[in-house]
Image (tube, helix red, strand yellow):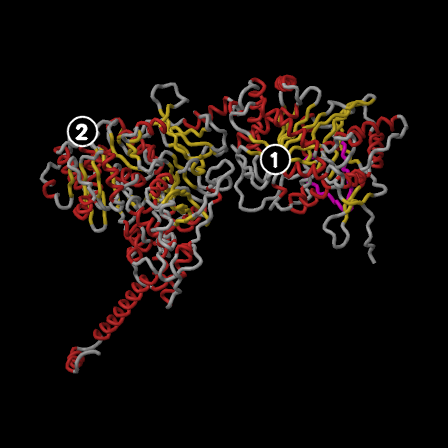
Amino acid sequence: MQNSTIEGFRLSPQQKYLWRLQQIDSALPYRVQCAVLIEGNLNCEILNKALQNVVNRHEILRTNFQCLPGMTIPLQVIAGYSSLSVYEHDLTGLTEEEQKSKTEFSLHEISQQPFDLEKGTVLYASLFTWSVEKHILILSLSAMNADNSTLLNLIREIRNSYSACLQGKELEDTPIQYADIAEWQYELLNSEDTEIGKEYWRRIDFKNLAKIKLSGELKSTQSLEFKPKVLELKISSGLSDQILSTVAKYNTTSSVILLTCWQILIWKLTQQAEIITGIACSGRKYEELELALGLLSKYLPLHCNLTAELKFNQLLQQVEQLVNDAEKWQEYFHWEDLADLDKPNEVLPICFEFQEGLNKYCEADISFSIYKQYACTTKFKLKLSCLQTEDSINADFYYDSSLFTSVDIKRISEYFETLLNSVVNNSDAAIGELEILSDRNRKQLLFDFNQNVAAFQATSLQRGEYNCVYQLFEAQATLNPDTIAVVFENQQLTYRQLNERANQLANYLQKIEVKPEVIVGICLERSLEIVIAILAILKAGGAYLPLDPAMPAERLALMLRDAQASVLLTQNQFVETLHTTSLQEKTRRLICLDTEWDKIAQESNENCSSIATPANLAYVIYTSGSTGKPKGVAVEHQQILNYLYGILPRIDLPAGSSFAMVSTFAADLGNTAIFPALCTGGLLHIISQNLASDPELLAAYFEDNSIDCIKIVPFHLSALLTSPQAASVLPRKRLILGGETTNWDLIDRIHQYAPNCIIINHYGPTESTVGVLTYQVDAQNLCHISETVPIGRPIPNTQIYILDSQLQPVPIGVTGEIYIGGDSLARGYLNQPEITAEKFITNPFVNRFNVRIYKTGDAARYLPDGNIEFLGRIDNQVKIRGFRIELGEIEATIRQHSDIEQVVVIVREDVPGEKRIVAYFAPSSESVDTLPATSLQQVKNIREFLQQKLPDYMIPSAFVQIKTFPLTANGKIDRQALPAPDKASLAGTFVAPRNPIEETLADIWREVIKIEKVGINDNFFELGGHSLLATQVISRLRQAFQINLPLHYLFESPTIADFAVVIAQKLSEQADEVMLADMVAELEQLSEEEVQKLLANGGIN
């Protein structure tokens, strides 16, 4: 029977923590090893004896770890004797380079050898002979038995033992044993200072500190194996001397200087004000422990708060005090106290350690010095390990290679070296002023990435011949007069017809004083007339203002007044609405293109005389404004031309290709289809709102009409791809995504349906004329680095800068704000010089006068290859379904409601990929008693109020009444603490589905809106539904009932009870049609005689 008794000692607290880490990962990474350079006339036999004597003297070098049955934590089991074998390698026949290479390879090979902690050899030793007077001794131990200080102490022990053996003596002193130290540590926990020490560490609130994510860190959706590697940085002697001078200046230590610089670098790389760094304490602050072997060191959390204004010397003092306090209470910090954290081993991803050592340990005629050193006793993402000797400072960057590449760490090491130089030369500066970018890095970010000046061509036409975009269209009308230019439903126009109609309207407009800088509104449904109107206004020299007829009349009036539009082109169906809402002012001419065309058609169909210049206004598009008032972006002809010439090579389609316009004309998203199509002899398909939002109908249209290219918002495309005909809603050659972030899951779905279609991710605010960055997705994409699809590189004649709050470039991988410069920048905001001056600022990186850059408010970072990844907004602006929305405008509008006193609007993403606007409101004290009794009625009132003022996409999908808004410690509203809306509370009295049709509807609504319970009287849109979600509902209903349901049915019957009636009627009609078809088929089989006989008998019953 096997003996179940083990004689041993309990693990120390450090060993216990490390043991648990090894169960999560593996024991392989956790080791300490070094290569010792031995110079002089070495006696190898004496060295072997000295090494054995050291093993005999120190129990920890003979200690294994064994568990009793049922135990999860092992005991330290000390062997009475352990024979040490030294593996010898003769490299004397090799060149010095070959010797170094062979030794380095062996070091790596040894580091990959697993330890047998239960019964294996504790100390591994290998001796490499380079020459008679030069040897390398490699020592390797498990981190359960050693730490960094152990290596230095072990070298001292070997030197002393070697000296004693040479003299035939034994070392007289008795070393302190590790098992005794472990027991002393536990006794210390019962001392009177224990509670005071633990209280010191409880002050650090680990849970509320943001997780540190470093630049270049690989995206991971799974748990990765910890794979530590190290990159060495040799700090020059000159810089080392300057560091020591700074040490003397502030009467501190090299350790504190280097740690402070490390904190600053991490702060600059993460832009997180609160940072916790794990600092290594040797665990040997008592004199008796200084020379002890074994795992005594631990990493203690150092919590710093950094701001750009903080002076370096102030931070230095803060860090020095924190280090002193941490070392004072180091014995009382234990990871078991953090057991309530999800992953306590990941709390200290950034670590720092510092050691001082002699250059050489000399004895008799030989010397011992460290050649290479490696120690990994805890898990980390990145650790800086510094070793200071008499004449140098070395910095080793340990990193988890499953998260970072060596290129990333090389870059970080360069940043650190640059920062050290900045500190020693400017140590009185604020930390925000300290540099981490070398001159070479700055040049790369500011200039090399922006080397894209180009002289353009479009098809075979030289840019210099044309001042305005409509002239390119006119050239195509001359070259391809009979080619179809534009199609809408069953209507189409050739280039000649389109040009002649545009000319007739342009000449008509010129007669009513439309000229350069005159703004003409276009309030039309999607139709051929929109394209005619755009071209006509540009030809006349004016600028067009696209208006969506679906917008609330009040908002349309606001935009027309702000733009001071003198003419408004519309259709007869909108005239009554325009008149009743006071849009028709005495100074504004209203023209109905459908009823007045006969008069317009009397004008000349020849091209107008060209009176617009490149610097004249071409169009104005309104975007959401934070003050509650939308702002008009004024774009000139020269910016459209720059965009057109820049985007055409990126799209890279032959002349004559077909484009489909699936978005509203009231935003500039569709300009990527309109102008590239009409200026290169292509075919422009205008897709109606009904068609664009119906996946089955759109698929059928695309199957009947060959579409080469579309530009679409990712969310819109996702809704369309829910259809069984998903592959048919994709273009044949180019898919351009824009308007919001694109995720990799969508790319995978697209590739599944259309593997040969090239995907281009396109970015750009309206202020930069449609878009300025493109990224072509291919098989070798960057999904392992970027969380979302990159937005790529700038189009020609455009500069992109990613800057910090001091307008300084941020390093590759670090988050900053996008600033845009170049020829695509809009003129500014119409009639708003103050906001224009605030957002369009002087470019600080060029010496030319009046060169501007636009402050986007978008957060982004450079990826290592120079592509850019979009990271969201840095302010209160969002993008929903491709529309740019200022949450402040929604808040300002809701506050206009007489019953509302306070409101906060945020974007929530409670379901990944499902962004929605949520409004939290508190009623005014005067209205509390008069508010409706139910929250449903309150929400209905607010929603109806907003529908008169805001477009559909800006109306919150959920409203939450709240008594008291949660506040931060600074007294501001804590937006992160606002509760998730309970959609069920927005429903009325619950009435369950009563029949199979209602049950099917309820199931589909629950799935699409992500709600647990839906009653038959609940309103789809009041529960958070919107037009794109409605397309998913319609698509699933078609599959469920096998009937054709237009999208507008859901808008007209938004409750389950009402919509079920519609479906029942359609099913009944379909059944009648089937019965009639069967009867007709039966009659067709009868002879004339049989038919006459049936009629004589009264017909078919």
Q: Magenta part of the protein: which range?
A: 106-128
In the image, is 541 to the left or to the right of 13?
Answer: left
Along the line of sight, the residue nearer the viewer: 716 or 29: 716
In the image, is 454 to the left or to the right of 375?
Answer: left
Residue type (three-letter) at the residue carrying disc 2: Ser
Q: Residue at x 42, y 32 (%)?
A: 818
**Residue 355 magenta-drawn?**
no
Q: What mark, if any, has residue 610 been given in the picture?
A: 2
- Give neighbour class at mark 2: few <14, some 14-19, many 20+ (Cα, 10 Å): some
Q: Residue at x 64, y 27 (%)?
A: 321
User: Circle 1 — which element?
Assistant: strand
In the picture shown, does residue 680 fall above or below 99?
below
Q: Position of residue 622 (x, y in %)?
A: 29, 37
* Residue carrying label 1: 399
Question: Exactly how many numbered labels are in the figure?
Answer: 2
In the picture shown, does residue 314 fall above or below 109?
above
Q: Give the quadrant of residue 1089.
A: bottom left
Q: Position of residue 608 (x, y in %)?
A: 15, 32
In the picture shown, does residue 700 fall above or below 1100?
above
**Residue 125 magenta-drawn?**
yes
Distance Cα–Cα, label 2 vs label 1 = 64 Å
Q: Position of residue 1061 (x, y in %)?
A: 30, 65
In the image, is 1024 to the left or to the right of 12?
Answer: left
Q: Could you tell me if residue 128 is visible in this image?
A: no
Q: Give the quadrant of residue 365.
A: top right
Q: Earlier in the sequence, mark 2 or mark 1?
A: 1
Callouts 2 and 1 close, C-beta under 8 Å: no
User: Circle 2 — which element?
Assistant: loop
- Give neighbour class at mark 1: few <14, some 14-19, many 20+ (Cα, 10 Å): many
Residue type (three-letter) at the residue carrying disc 1: Tyr
The quarter in which the C terminus is drawn is: bottom left
